[in-house]
Amino acid sequence: MGRVVILVHRSCASSYSLFRQLKDKGLLGKVDLRPARSPEYGGRIVWSVPWLLVDDRPAGSDPLDVRVVEAAVKGDRLEPPEDQLSAFMEAVLHSSAASSLVALNYSLEPVLSEDLAAAALHEPLTGADVGRLLSQARSESKRLVEEWGVKIGRALAIGFVRELWWSRRGSLEPGEIEEAAGKGLFRLWLLAKASLGRAGLPSDPRVEANPIIEEAESFLSRLGDALVARVEREQREVLSDEEWARVAG
């Protein structure tokens, strides 16, 4: 068995769900759950939480099945995902950092990361060929971005609502999301979300609409209040659990 570390965040519903599943299976004492206090760990980017490492090698990302963690704890080998491109795109979808880069650049090129691909394929447990996957994703970037664009746009819309809710200390007025989307605040958020300084931005950062951005803004305009209600339910649950707070900081 290798050293199993899982980076989590208290506000993350996926991290919280995994914590509960690990507790139910009696695995909490066999993994090292650590708060993700930095966007990097051990010199590597943390693309999303929960983020699984086996002997400091990326082995899983959101969505992270508890069975993958169980295999890591037991030292079992796993079969690689049957559809490796879809597994990679799911990892992109569930990472707001990766999905914002894809949306702003309308390309997979900025997220063709060996670490993200290794996590998506559980490479330390499966021995999957990460380089082969990245080569395939690069050659099929246009098709994949088009096919996954609606899902990515909607995921980003929810992320925008969640972070606006945080910034307002958990209080948003009815209609506020629709107004924010109409004033271009989603695009402002996307510019900030997809960049570190200016790294990650297109060479001309003036935001051009593309199908992902249009889907996100349409989703916000149509369902703003419903998205706020969804975020409120999620965040009140994960932030109110005292046992989880002691673990996740």
Image: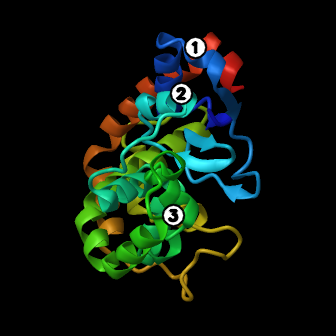
Tell me if mark 2 has few (under 14), some (14-19) or many (20+) residues whose alpha carbon lies within 10 angstroms of its own: few
Q: Is residue 159 above or below residue 131?
A: above
What number is the disc on residue 241? 1
Q: Is residue 90 above or below residue 132?
A: above
Mark 1: which secondary structure?
loop
What number is the disc on residue 135? none
Provide residue 153's location: percent of width, then percent of height.
Answer: 34, 59
What number is the disc on residue 190? 3
- Judge by depth and name the residue closer to the eye, 24 or 210: 24
Q: Is residue 220 above or below residue 21?
A: below
Tell me the quadrant of the picture where the C terminus can be found.
top right
Decide: marks 3, 1 in contact (CB < 8 A)?
no
Provide residue 229's location: percent of width, then percent of height.
Answer: 37, 30
Question: Which color scheme does this rendered protein use?
Answer: rainbow
Q: Could you tell me the amino acid type at mark 3?
A: Leu
Provide residue 60's location: percent of width, then percent of height.
Answer: 51, 45
